[in-house]
Amino acid sequence: MKAANYYASGEIDRATHLRNDDDWLAEQLANPSSRFAPVWRMQNLFAKDDEQQPVFLHTGEATAATADEMVWLGFENGTAYFALDYSKQAEPPLDDIGVFRDLRAVGALLSHQAGTLLAYARGIVYWHNRHRFCGECGAPTLSRHAGHLRVCNNPD
């Protein structure tokens, strides 16, 4: 039997039915137990003193720097996880907390849970960065459904 893809077989519950509930999402963003996976130019944040230890920000840390995009990833073990994209910033943010590194450099050394969450965060940020404009008319797109849908902002 072939093993499942390491990064695609995590335990995260994407709970799609909650993506349109703005009040619920606001509660999760303010919840002290929520965690945030920062991404800067397709790199994930790792601890300064242990560059194989991923950093998931707490609610207060996540609001300290302004992210370009926020996507709700889902639940894992009762904790809500979000991806934060800082790619528009010229220099890597959060340098007091950690170092941004390419996931491929340390992916095999991570726990299954961490590898899955970081790959998911990186992948959805990549998708957002590649779909900023409508394929039909070229107008900018807007993020909806907690970051899982992009819609054209051209009313025509």
Image: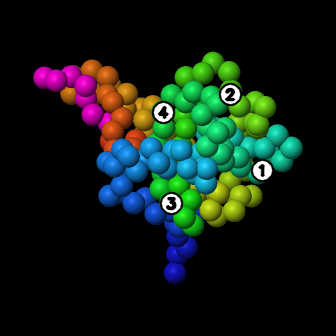
Residue drawn at 68 percent across, 21 percent down: 91
Q: Earlier in the sequence, mark 2 or mark 1?
A: 1
Between the C-alphas of marks 4 and 2, the distance is 14 Å
Between the C-alphas of marks 3 and 1, the distance is 23 Å
The spot of residue 125 in percent (x, y) is 49, 39
Which mark is drawn over residue 93?
2
Which mark is drawn over residue 52?
1
Circle 2 sits in a helix, a strand or a loop, which is it? loop
Q: Earlier in the sequence, mark 4 or mark 2?
A: 4
Residue type, numbered disc 2: Pro
Residue drawn at 61 percent across, 43 percent down: 59
Answer yes or no: do the residues labelled 4 and 3 have beta carbons within 8 Å? no
Between the C-alphas of marks 2 and 1, the distance is 18 Å
Residue drawn at 32 percent across, 58 percent down: 17
Residue drawn at 47 percent across, 56 percent down: 74
Q: Is residue 10 above or below residue 47?
A: below
Q: Earlier in the sequence, mark 1 or mark 4?
A: 1
Q: Which residues are magenta?
A: 150-156
Q: Is residue 111 above or below residue 137?
A: below
Residue type, numbered disc 3: Phe
